[in-house]
Amino acid sequence: MQIFKLPDLGEGLAEAEIVAWHVAPGDRVVADQPLVSVETAKAIVEIPAPQSGTVVRLYAEPGDVVHVGDPLVEFGEGGREDAGAVVGEVAKAPPAAAAPPPRPAPPAARPSPAGVRATPAVRALAQRLGVDLAMVKPTGPDGMITAADVQRAARALEEAGPPEPLRGVRRAMARNMAQAHAEVAAVTVVDDADIEAWEDGQDVTLRLVRAIVAGCRAEPGLNAWYDGHAMTRRVVEAIHLAIAVDTPDGLFTPVLRDVAGRSPEDLRAALDRIKADVRTRQVPPEEMRGYTFTLSNFGTIAGRYADPVVVPPTVAILGAGRLRREVVATDEGPAIHRVLPLSLSFDHRCVTGGEAARFLRAVMDDLAKPH
């Protein structure tokens, strides 16, 4: 018997969620036959069978989250054809449904943080009702949590419904945002680009891409990767631009490669293609990694300014707000112009305020051009 374990899926992905099995216990499979579809933080990936043989046991069910190195399938007879994928052998185990992964302990199972004041009876009540005392607003004397406080919190939790574990893209987003806020010394500068001179039919996204190229040429240090542990910066010559794409499943950031060296027509075709891939969750993994700068055009939905989050190892992200008309001062007097709000967030550990301001100035100057 041989065990096939979840292989390394690249890009630092440590886990995946089982979407669908394409085989069942007792099936005879051949090498490279589709085995299972898994959802990662990047896309839905189909994992092929690493060998020929008979499927004896499936170790996970659809919806389960498995980590790299966890067992996926036990094979029976059949020579191993991919020694790099089948990463271990174990003693024969009877075919049986895998036990479900352990569920996270309810909030009350965690130790109460220091400073929470409650009697042993109230703590026992909170434990029984699954209430985290740290979430309870005390109404008793001297900040004491009462039984009524716990019961009120329990009713609120019941009305809110059961907790839903974050999966796939949203799970990765939660981790990335926590890492970003823990590591990055983020600062945001905002301004408005006057685009009244634009000729009809301008593609807003492509104009923003071109403006970012202008900004990177003015201040190359914003197109970089920063290693906070080693305190080293790598300025990257090619501009690989991640485009934030909103979906019901979460935020995706497919990458446009070498945007400075491509024609507008090529960029538009690439944008349309990767957005279609995002909608169908068929983004190739290579199109989700290695970006050097990020664009978030959130204004297509709503919003004027924002604090876009810089995700390590990149050092900057540009957000574009909702295009609007505004009274501006001109040499001829007040006039109504179209303006595009911009929010540039940068990692102040390796980017100075002056560099960020000059980058933003170059972006605005490029956007002000008629075409």
Image (tube, rainbow, N blue to C red):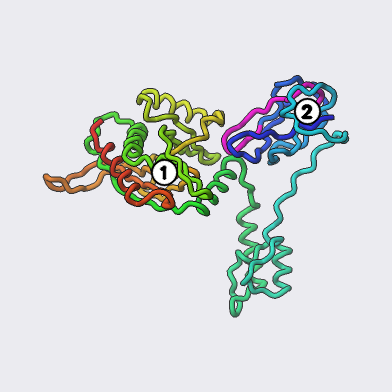
Q: Residue furthest top?
A: 30
Q: Which residues are magenta?
A: 38-55
Placement of 217 over or under 132, stated as above or below: above
Q: Dividing the picture into quarters, in which one does residue 263 lie?
A: top left
Question: Is 293 displayed left or right of 199 in the figure?
Answer: right
Q: Are marks 1 and 2 in contact (CB under 8 Å)?
A: no
Q: Is residue 116 magenta?
A: no
Q: Position of residue 84 (x, y in %)?
A: 72, 28
Q: Residues within 10 Å of mark 2 (few under 14, many from 20)?
A: some
Does residue 301 show up?
A: no
Residue positioned 62% across, 43% down in the render:
167
Question: Is 85 displayed left or right of 96 in the figure?
Answer: left
Looking at marks 1 and 2 on the same chain, the residue that comes earlier in the sequence is marked by 2
- Which secondary structure lies at badge 1? strand
What residue is shown with label 2? Answer: 24
Nearer to me, 206 or 87? 87
Nearer to me, 86 or 249? 86
Q: Position of residue 269 (x, y in %)?
A: 42, 24
Distance from Cα at disc 1 to Cα at disc 2 = 46 Å
Q: Is residue 42 magenta?
A: yes
Placement of 346 over or under 74, stated as above or below: below
Q: Which label sits on residue 317? A: 1
Q: Position of residue 342 (x, y in %)?
A: 34, 45
**Quadrant containing the C terminus in the rendered view:** top left
Q: How many marks?
A: 2
Question: Disc 1 marks which amino acid?
Answer: Ile
Does residue 271 show up?
A: yes
Q: Position of residue 252 (x, y in %)?
A: 51, 38
